[in-house]
Image (tube, rainbow, N blue to C red):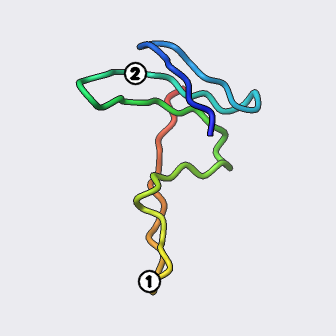
Amino acid sequence: MLILTRSIGERIVIDDNIVLTVVRIRGQRAQLGLEAPPEVPIRRAETLATDDQSEPQAPILVSQSG
């Protein structure tokens, strides 16, 4: 795992087509913005199905501002 320190407004670029931006930091929480092509699914880890669930949960849809 790569661990980086970023400030508000700073970005991380992954594979030239995914951009992670630090939008806001409040206490122990960071609000992140993600920009990715429509074919790249973006899901929060807690919404992924686990082995003991009978049905996977639907992915969280992320709107992309242009």
- Pick whichever, 4 or 19, lies toward us: 4
In this rendering, is residue 60 above or below 26? below
| Marks 2 and 1, how far apart at CA | 35 Å
Looking at the rendered image, the quarter that the C terminus falls into is: top right
Position of residue 50 measured from the top left corner of the image (x, y, whole percent)? 47, 74
Badge 2 vs badge 1, beta-carbon distance below 8 Å: no
Q: Please name the amino acid that badge 1 sits on.
A: Asp
Q: Please name the amino acid that badge 2 sits on.
A: Val
- Pick whichever, 18 or 37, lies toward us: 18
In this rendering, is residue 53 above or below 43? below
In this rendering, is residue 66 above or below 45? above
Disc 1 crowd rating (10 Å Cα; few below 14, some 14-19, many 20+) is few
Secondary structure under tag 1 reads: loop
Position of residue 25 measured from the top left corner of the image (x, y, whole percent)? 31, 22
Q: Which mark is residue 41?
A: none
Position of residue 18 measured from the top left corner of the image (x, y, whole percent)? 66, 33
**Residue occupied by mark 1:** 52
- Lower sequence index among marks 2 and 1: 2
At 50% across and 80% down in the image, what residue appears?
51
At 44% across and 13% down in the image, what residue appears?
7
Q: Quadrant of residue 52?
A: bottom left
At 44% across and 55% down in the image, what residue appears?
60
Of circles 2 and 1, the one toward us is 1
Position of residue 1 measured from the top left corner of the image (x, y, whole percent)? 62, 40
**Residue occupied by mark 2:** 23
Left/right placement of residue 26 relative to residue 20 reads left
- Tell which residue pokes out farthest to the right in this image: 15
Disc 2 crowd rating (10 Å Cα; few below 14, some 14-19, many 20+) is some
At 51% across and 35% down in the image, what residue appears?
64
- Pick whichever, 10 or 35, lies toward us: 10
